[in-house]
Image: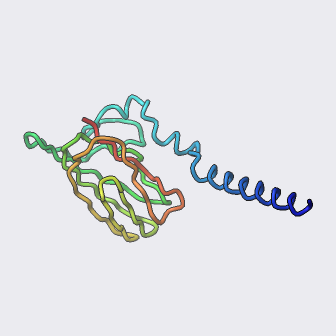
Amino acid sequence: MKKDYLILFLAIFVLLGVFIILAINFYPSQTKKEALNIENPQIQKIPEPGDVVDEKIAVPSTKVETGKTNFRKFYLNLNNESLDKTYIIAQKDEILNIEFNASDKDYDLSVPQYFLMISVPKGKSKIIEFQATREGNFKIICDNCKNKEIGYLMIKK
């Protein structure tokens, strides 16, 4: 009889442990909810060079219109395991040139849905260039940071 209770207790304990681990890993934190606030009206608009926008939005330094395909250049700084701008907003089919500058450590960045990866050594700048062929909101991941999601690439129609 005692053996049956012991097995039941262990099973409940294991299930409770699995539930707690899943809840911690998969329940979105408050920071993540706030980070992708697509209700913000400024995030609905694609910024142009010289625009004054929310401090979390990257403003392109350059935009060149070449007919159907536009070119946008962004400069972003990496420091303290975060980007200085959370959102990079562009239009579908534009060519994006993003220069990352790492000031405090090496960073390994990726945008998995676009199959983009770049390593930025401490004290150096690296450029990634690609055409935004898919619209949507895509996470910018830092593979060697505590908070993996450090920004968003938002491609509008």
- For the point 26% across and 60% down, which residue is it? 128
**Residue nearest the observer in this picture, 112 or 73:** 112
Q: Residue at x 40, y 50 (%)?
A: 139
Q: In the image as oriented, which residue stretches furthest toward the left?
A: 67
Quarter where residue 15 is shown = bottom right
- Of residues 47 and 28, the one nearer the viewer is 28
In this rendered view, identify the residue nearer to me: 46 or 77: 46
Write the residue at 23% across / 50% down. 96
Q: Is residue 71 left or right of residue 138?
A: left
Question: Residue 36: where, in percent of width, then height?
Answer: 45, 40
Q: Is 152 located above or below residue 6 in the figure? A: above
Quarter occupied by the N terminus: bottom right
Identify the image's colour scheme: rainbow, by chain, secondary structure or one colour. rainbow
* Quarter location, residue 64: top left
| Residue 102 in the image, given as x and y percentages of width and height | 39, 64
Task: Report how many numbered discs are placed on residues in the image.
Answer: 0
- From the viewer's perspective, is residue 123 above or below residue 31? below
Quadrant of the rendering where the C terminus is positioned: top left
Residue 150: horizontal and vertical position, in percent?
Answer: 45, 53
Q: Residue furthest right?
A: 2
Question: Where residue 143 appears, x then y in whole percent?
Answer: 45, 63
